[in-house]
Amino acid sequence: MAYTYKELKSKTVAQLREIASGIEHEAVKGYTQLNKDHLLKAICAALNIDTFEHHRAVGIEKGKIKKRIRELKKERDAAIAEKQRDKLKQVRAEIKQLKRTLRKSMV
């Protein structure tokens, strides 16, 4: 059966040991002595499962937002150089709002 990292992470140590018992691989040798973190890494290595949980943006155009943030950072640097406090405050607030939008859209 094919597993995902998220599925394996939600299982108990006993369930992970049961899965490891059916795997013939160097990484899972001594599985009865491993704790959950080490066992999870060993099973993922044996089954070639990526241990990083990928996030993706849903409902927004991530590329456009990131492009706008880069433009605003240039404006921010110019405002710092010209010592325009009001412009600097406005630009920083917009950057913060755009970054917050990106974080909230991640699933």
Image (cartoon, rainbow, N blue to C red):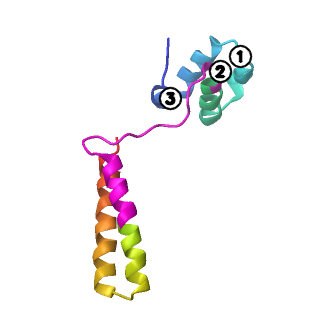
Residue under the point 50% across and 11% down: 1
Residue 79, given in percent of the width and then of the height, sits at 37, 81
| Circle 2 crowding by C-alpha within 10 Å: few under 14, some 14–19, many from 20 | some
| Circle 1 crowding by C-alpha within 10 Å: few under 14, some 14–19, many from 20 | some
Q: Which residue is mark 1?
A: 25
Magenta segment boundaries in residue numbering: 45-71
Whichever of callouts 1 and 3 sits on the residue coming sooner in the sequence is: 3
Q: Which residue is mark 2?
A: 46
Q: Secondary structure at mark 3?
A: helix
- In-front residue for pair 18/102: 102
Residue type beneath disc 2? Ala
Quadrant in the rendering for residue 97:
bottom left
Whichever of callouts 1 and 2 sits on the residue coming sooner in the sequence is: 1
Residue type beneath disc 3? Tyr
Residue 46 sits inside the magenta stretch:
yes
Residue type beneath disc 1? His
Q: Secondary structure at mark 1?
A: loop
Tell me the quarter of the image containing the C terminus.
top left
Depicted 15 relative to depicted 68: above or below: above
CA gap between label 1 and label 3 equals 18 Å
| Circle 3 crowding by C-alpha within 10 Å: few under 14, some 14–19, many from 20 | some
Q: Which residue is mark 3?
A: 5
